[in-house]
């Protein structure tokens, strides 16, 4: 099999890769029947020369390969007809801005496999950049705290060579005792967030202690859905019910907002579910949170202060708690927001290595050797010039209905 790594074509440029040079070498050494080709690119976090130094072939185009790996959506003009493409298509939730892309995929008879739906039979995702979203987003949370307080300045994550340099900045952070950080979510994103908090030496406490006690040091609590949601009818909480029937629940987060200084949302939000807190909650004098690092970044979603995505170049903005209008930093009655929506791009080398490792361990054996759990078919959105049966629900979206 001939496998290619495409040159990322999105604007602004994305420096991430599906496989690092060392990982590409590992693949060809592990699978003798595989040839790997790297499309020339001036923007990757790893240079063409780094791939070439390991004996990998740098090429002008990938029309001769069978299978093409990328990261972001491939531009319509860059889709290669009659080939198999792997990338994050952002179509499975019927995103309006990518309907034309999905139509072009079908028109060009592209077999599209989407990383987002590479899952185990139980639905657990096999690959993703969530861990590094959590790592960078939490680092940016403390950039925001430094901007708000003026007590310290951190080097932007995207200016750091790698995670090691980013972590070398952490000792600059100054937090008062009893500084409380609330984190929602239990998945990859939350795991990455906790890695940074632990590296800083922030103590983890349970939700009850977080609410009721004062501490002589900074602390954080990780809230699972049963701790910040409650059943509308007052019946006992059931986590599976909360995920399956989110509309039947109300938020119970405000009690944490009354004692927390910082909030880091790392959860998945169901649009049918409750908001985390309301505009009225935010405007209340009892609302204590000063910084929200919204890693989830659902615009017009569960967190009213997230009024727009921010950018890698300008990750922080300030929102008036009463009007929800953007204001200057440290204005009276304001909250500091970090809402970068492409956080892993800030540490492209580390994020790529993490992602490629997951692909090699969890996906390539199914793709190249044996796939008893139908991992590949379940992730195939289109084949033979049409939607795969698992994705028939996209028919109306595809046809613009």
Image (spheres, rainbow, N blue to C red):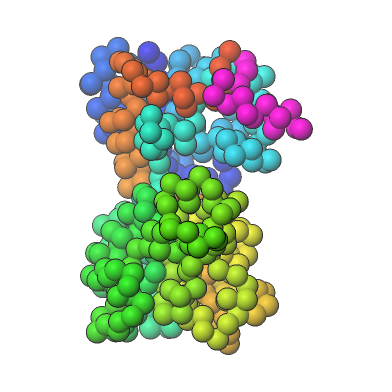
- Picture coordinates of residue 330 (x, y %)? 53, 83
Q: Which residue does the image show at 35% across and 39% down from the upper left? A: 355
Residue 126 in sight here: yes
In the image: residue 96, left or right of residue 69: right
Corner quadrant of residue 393: top right
| 201 or 14: nearer the viewer | 201
Most distant residue in the right direction:
401
Occupied quadrant, residue 167 = bottom left
Is residue 54 toward the left or the right of residue 333 in the image? left
Residue situated in front as seen by the camera: 160 or 83? 83
Q: Is residue 176 above or below residue 308?
A: below
Specify start and end residues of the magenta stretch as a single range.
Answer: 385-401
Magenta includes 400? yes
Q: Does the magenta stretch include residue 368?
A: no
Q: Is residue 283 left or right of residue 145?
A: right
Q: Quadrant of the N terminus?
A: top left
Where residue 209 appears, as percent x and y from the top left, is 30, 75
């Amino acid at each position: 099999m001939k496998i290619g790594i495409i040159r990322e074509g999105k604007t602004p440029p994305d420096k991430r890769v599906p496989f690092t040079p060392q990982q590409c070498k590992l693949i060809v050494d592990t699978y003798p029947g595989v040839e790997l080709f790297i499309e020339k690119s001036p923007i990757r976090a790893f240079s063409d020369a780094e791939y070439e130094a390991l004996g990998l072939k740098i090429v002008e185009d990938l029309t001769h390969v069978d299978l093409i790996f990328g990261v972001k959506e491939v531009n319509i003009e860059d889709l290669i007809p009659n080939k198999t493409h792997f990338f994050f298509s952002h179509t499975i939730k019927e995103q309006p801005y990518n309907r034309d892309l999905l139509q072009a995929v079908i028109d060009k008879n592209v077999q599209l496999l989407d990383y987002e739906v590479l899952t185990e039979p139980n639905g657990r995702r096999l690959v993703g950049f969530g861990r590094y979203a959590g790592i960078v987003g939490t680092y940016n949370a403390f950039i925001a705290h430094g901007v708000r307080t003026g007590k310290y300045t951190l080097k932007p994550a995207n200016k750091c060579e790698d995670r090691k340099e980013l972590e070398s900045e952490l000792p600059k952070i100054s937090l008062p005792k009893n500084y409380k950080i609330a984190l929602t979510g239990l998945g990859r994103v939350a795991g990455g967030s906790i890695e940074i908090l632990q590296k800083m030496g922030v103590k983890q406490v349970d939700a009850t202690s977080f609410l009721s006690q004062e501490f002589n040091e900074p602390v954080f609590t990780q809230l699972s859905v049963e701790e910040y949601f409650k059943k509308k009818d007052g019946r006992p909480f059931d986590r599976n019910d909360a995920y399956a029937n989110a509309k039947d629940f109300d938020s119970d987060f405000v009690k944490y907002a009354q004692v927390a200084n910082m909030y880091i949302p790392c959860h998945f939000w169901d649009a049918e579910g409750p908001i985390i807190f309301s505009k009225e909650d935010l405007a209340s004098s009892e609302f204590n949170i000063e910084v929200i690092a919204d890693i989830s970044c659902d615009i017009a979603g569960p967190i009213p202060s997230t009024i727009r995505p921010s950018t890698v170049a300008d990750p922080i903005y300030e929102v008036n708690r009463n009007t929800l209008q953007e204001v200057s930093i440290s204005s009276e009655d304001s909250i500091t927001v970090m809402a970068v929506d492409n956080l892993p791009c800030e540490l492209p080398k580390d994020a790529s290595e993490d992602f490629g490792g997951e692909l090699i361990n969890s996906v390539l054996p199914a793709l190249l050797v044996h796939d008893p759990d139908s991992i590949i078919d379940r992730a195939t959105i289109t084949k033979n010039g049409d939607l795969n049966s698992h994705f028939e629900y996209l028919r109306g979206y595809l046809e613009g209905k």
